[in-house]
Amino acid sequence: MARAAGFYHRPVQPEPSRPSSPSPAYALPSALAAQTKFVRLGSPNVPALIAHPDWTTPRPTVIWMHGRTVSKELDNGRYLRWIRAGFAAVALDLPGHGERFEAALQSPTRTLDVLTQMVGEIDHVIEALADGSVSEANVFDLDRLAIGGMSAGGMCALRRCCEPHQFAAITVEGTAGNLERLYLEPTTPLAPKLVMHDPSKVRGLSAMANMARWRPIPLLALHSEADAVVPVGCMTSFVEALGGHYARLGADPAMLTMRTWPSTGAPDEHNGFGRVAAEAKTIQAQWLGRVLGVAESGGP
């Protein structure tokens, strides 16, 4: 597997995935809990919540990463929708979050450190899904593998797709492909709260600055136009530029979908989708089903 060059990889020998435990703050719905395993994946021991429709049949799989200061268990109704739609969810704790809580890494001053480490851990996660350590049965169809995330998690997903990869699709929410616009040219109402990071580190992690190596795949981005934390322009500008990149490569820019709402009523118009949350989740689940080739019945 081609790895993301220049990112964190812990230099230890691979080890089997081992049992993990959920963060206590978020209880899973019983229907989801019955289909969920908590494990640690790969040599970095990345904490993961893995939900699967039946744990016997190879299913399309989505790797999902949460935003800063929360954990993989947040907004877990998303995973229930996914398994009911016929694909598996692999939700990861970002470094310093959830089961690997470290207060210093939740500081906005360390966001780029979190992104760098998480981008480098993604390949270890995929290897663990493939090596049978999670399930003796081959239950993850890695030929139909998608990646995604919200806010900081979405930034990780976007940056990873700028290097050689095996993903069939990517879906993100409330995030930035254009980190230069977010950190170096802040226009958000919360700009005084933003930390001004080293420009070279920002550009190194920005999907916009590293787009040349992006292989055309379907993308779905969801965003509130009133987002006060990550302004929608940090994503619309990236999607527009990515469309030009697709066209230059002879790919169809229509593979890119950006869905926005004028406002949602969510806190800071960033944390979830408020009154349109059900609509947003339905759009995402149906889109994933189409691009991953899941039958309408939810079967493989």
Image (cartoon, rainbow, N blue to C red):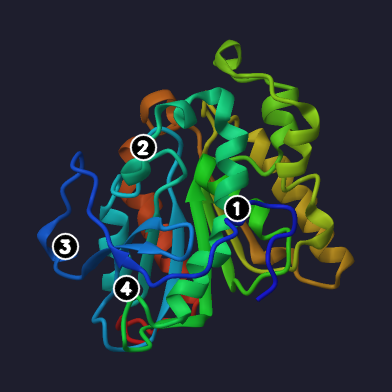
Q: Earlier in the sequence, mark 2 or mark 4?
A: 4
Q: Earlier in the sequence, mark 1 or mark 4?
A: 4
* Residue 33, numbered circle: 3
Give 85 or 72, whichever is nearer the viewer: 72
Residue located beneath label 4 in the image: 85
Q: Mark 2 highlights which residue?
A: 101
Q: Which residue type carries mark 3? A: Ala
Which residue extends farthest top?
192
User: Quadrant of residue 166 in the image?
Assistant: bottom right
What is the x, y in percent for residue 134?
34, 75
Q: Between tags 1 and 4, which lies in front?
A: 1
Image quadrant assignment for residue 208: top right
Q: Is residue 28 left or right of residue 285?
A: left
Which is in the foreground here, disc 1 or disc 3?
A: 1
Rendered position, 130 above or below 249: below
Whole-percent x, y for residue 127 in the image = 51, 74
Classify 10 Å Cα crowding around label 3: few (below 14), some (14-19), many (20 and above): some
Q: Secondary structure at mark 3?
A: helix
Q: Is residue 75 above or below residue 251?
A: above
* Alpha carbon separation for disc pair 4 and 3: 16 Å
> Horizontal and vertical percent for residue 284?
44, 59
Residue at disc 4, secondary structure: helix
Q: CA distance from mark 3 to mark 2?
A: 22 Å
For the residue pair 251 and 183, the one nearer the viewer reads as 183
Q: CA distance from mark 1 to mark 4?
A: 27 Å
Give the residue number, with chain letter if any, for mark 1: 119
Q: Which residue is at a point 37% across and 78% down the rendered structure image?
A: 133
Circles 3 and 2 in contact, beta carbons < 8 Å: no
Which amino acid type corresponds to the residue marked 2 in the rendered image? Phe
Tell me which amino acid carries mark 1: Val
Asked if residue 113 lies left or right of residue 72, the reply is right
